[in-house]
Image: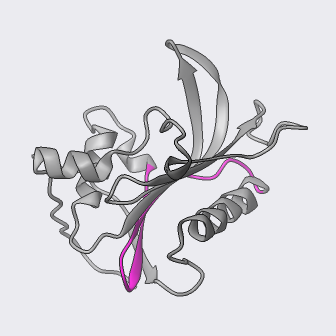
Amino acid sequence: MAKFKVRLTHVPRDPTFPRADDALGEHLWSMLSEKLEAGVPRPALFTFFPEAVQIVDVPPLLVPGVDLHHAFSAFASQPQAEAMAALGVMVRRQHNKVIGQFAVAFIEWPDGRWWSCSRPLDAAGQPLDGAEEDVQRAVDGAPKPGGLGAWFRRARFEGITLKLEGELVN
């Protein structure tokens, strides 16, 4: 059993986090875009429940010995999880070659649907001039971005569960 320490924040699931796929995606993309204006934002994982949103600060999981996809799948295993989203700046590779860094918002639902928006960034982490946002969705038949998602499926297939321990701080 893997153990790791993370910071969790819980906020109410109010109308700012809509349930419609595109509306939720657009809201999360706007949140990420606003944070980019201040510099490269810390990556975050969001788990959406009927009444709350759980936000995980991802950098503590980016250490040797922690399988990030396994950790994300553990969060997907939580009862009543309706969707999960990863937001941040990610490096994309093609055939083991770095092709650039991108701002990415990716959402996945337990039934396998997903929504993604990305935009290429320059070396300083700012949107490239002239580059546009690229929205892709499973419902349009687009291929899922590599290295993202399948968290709910993996949690079910491998029997992954999450046990949270620690203090609640408000």
Q: Position of residue 48 (x, y in %)?
A: 40, 71
Left or right? Give the position of 157 relative to 45: left
Q: What residue is drawn where x is 14% and y is 45%?
A: 157
46 vs 67: above or below: below
* Residue 74 visible to an observer of this rendering: yes
User: x, y (%) of residue 160?
Assistant: 14, 51
Q: Residue at x 40, y 81 (%)?
A: 52
Q: Is residue 150 left or right of residue 19?
A: left
Q: Give the residue furthest to the right.
A: 130
Total tally of numbered discs in the picture: 0
Residue 104: image location, x then y, percent: 60, 46
Residue stretch in magenta: 38-58
Q: Determine which quarter of the picture holds residue 54.
A: bottom left
Let me know if residue 53 is in the magenta part: yes
Q: Is residue 2 visible?
A: no
Which image quadrant: the C terminus? bottom left
53 w.r.t. 115: above or below: below
Q: In the figure, 27 relative to 101: above or below?
A: below
Residue 105: where, in percent of width, then height?
58, 52
Q: In the drawing, does residue 116 fall left or right of residue 4?
A: right
Is 44 placed left or right of 32 in the picture?
A: left
Report which quarter residue 34 is drawn in: bottom right
105, 21: nearer the viewer:
21
Task: Tell me what residue is drawn at x 16 percent, y 52 percent.
Answer: 156
Task: Determine if the magenta segment contains residue 66.
Answer: no
Image colouring = one colour
